[in-house]
Amino acid sequence: MWEAINNALTAIDNFVWGVPLMVIILLGGFLLTLRTKCLQVHKLPLALKWMLKNEEDGVGEVSSFGALCTALSATIGTGNIVGVATAIGTGGPGALFWMELAAFLGMATKYSEGLLAVKYREVAPDGHSLGGPFYYIEKGMGKNFKWLAKLFAFFGICAGLLGIGTFTQVNGIVSSISGFFDPNNEHTVNLFGIGDYSITVIIASLVLAVLVALVLIGGLQRISSVSQVIVPFMAVLYFIATLVLLLCNITEIPHAIAVIVEAAFNPQAVTGGIVGSMIVAMQKGIARGIFSNEAGLGSAPIAAAAAKTKEPVRQGLISMTGTFIDTIIICTMTGLSIVITGAWKVEGLEGVQITTYAFQNGLPIPSQLASLILVLCLVFFAFTTILGWDYYSERCLEYLTDGKMKSVKVYRWLYIIAVFIGPYMTVSAVWTMADIFNGLMAIPNMIALFALSGIVAKETSDFFKRKKEGKVKE
């Protein structure tokens, strides 16, 4: 039965993530790069400066940095550690090249999403904010396209409950914990007749579900406050670990880059037929890249809409740094580590096992300590991603039900249940489902970004003109 389900999901995934969608995402990023005059390059220093500087008189629920951390909590997760590994393991080293290209163009996409989210958001008298693709589709494109906005919201709920928000994250957390504490599955119990599972898997799923419930009951403010503590700390820890690995193997980096570039266009020459074609490398690289940084997906602008700001462009710039940090920095370092150590070529490894192998063989420390560092990073990254995606999917449901908070509260408990059952799904099925819903979310969002690219260009031009005249507060 599981084989039939996996085959069906793979067929759907290949259809959704076919050449047309990849072209739409890359073309959309290229168009927005042109219309914003390659803003992701010459305005990046300003964006990084404003990332840590909040507007004192902004309107919204949380600070700009808090909104960014909420967005980063949903992006810096298993995509950076497991997603990169599965992309390279399936599509070869060339997948990293396509991931980086998509991320560079995606910075312009993410900027545009953040800008439009703030421009078209709704802020209630109590400060409660609601915005994102569903509002910039409805308000920017017009009431006739409300069906498209509702379609996005529906896919967003599915992605949160059945894909990127729960199953992939929990599966990654529990797999890494089980691999560390019970790698040979020596301590197992039969669970309700569905199979034998390690005791560590059962305990981890229970503890995780309880912790998620405790945070989610507190709403956005608690999610934001938890994210602002965990995300920067764990990002720095993971950055330092991968930086040490790369410095210890610095002489191998030029060769690794050459392999990545060659494999992007001629995979067979590098892999010797171990993995697929250039199309497979593109598909896995772009799909996993979007899974990681969510540029074009339409999720991050939901968090951006809650930022305390009066300037859509300013928040767009801050949102753009999320893609830079997530993919250009963290995913690149993970990918280089995997290619340098040859982890992607080791037979029998999948998902987090590939990255674990890279850490164990690339870091100048005992393998158990290297594994522990990776487990800690993965657990906390994935935990905050679960929190961030609950917020996204709740906002989608709030829009879809016209603000009926009773439905949101019921959904919250369904989300917690999904967190609990996530570890018992197969790895391949989990990641394929996540890819499918990501792709389905991206379609209505990219249509809106194409349609509203003129608004993005005008808002950008007007803002920097006012800034030049000294009318914008630093």
Image (cartoon, rainbow, N blue to C red):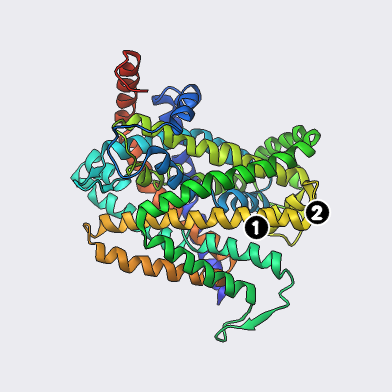
Say which quarter of the image contains residue 282: top right
Query: Which residue is found at the position 31% from the left and 45% from the top?
Result: 61
Drawn side of residue 309 relative to residue 365, left or right: left
Vertically, is 470 above or below 39?
Answer: above
Indicate the quadrant containing the C terminus: top left, top right, bottom left or bottom right. Answer: top left
Indicate the quadrant containing the N terminus: top left, top right, bottom left or bottom right. Answer: bottom right
Q: Which residue is mark 1?
A: 375
Mark 2 element type: loop
Vertically, is 451 above or below 83?
Answer: above
* Frontmost residue, 79 versus 243: 243
Answer yes or no: is residue 95 visible: no
The three-letter amino acid code for the residue at tag 2 is Pro
Q: Residue furthest top?
A: 469
Query: Which residue is found at the position 46% from the left and 44% from the top?
Result: 69
Q: Which residue is mark 2?
A: 366
Vertically, is 352 above or below 444?
Answer: below
Disc 2 and disc 1: Cα gap in Å?
Answer: 14 Å
The three-letter amino acid code for the residue at tag 1 is Val
Q: Residue furthest bottom?
A: 193
Q: Are marks 2 and 1 in contact (CB under 8 Å)?
A: no
Mark 1 element type: helix
Q: Position of residue 457 (x, y in %)?
A: 34, 26
Answer yes or no: is residue 219 visible: yes
Q: Position of residue 238 (x, y in %)?
A: 63, 46
Q: Mark 1, residues whose alpha carbon is within 10 Å: few (<14), some, or many (≥20)? A: many
Drawn side of residue 243 relative to residue 99, left or right: right
* Frontmost residue, 425 versus 208: 208
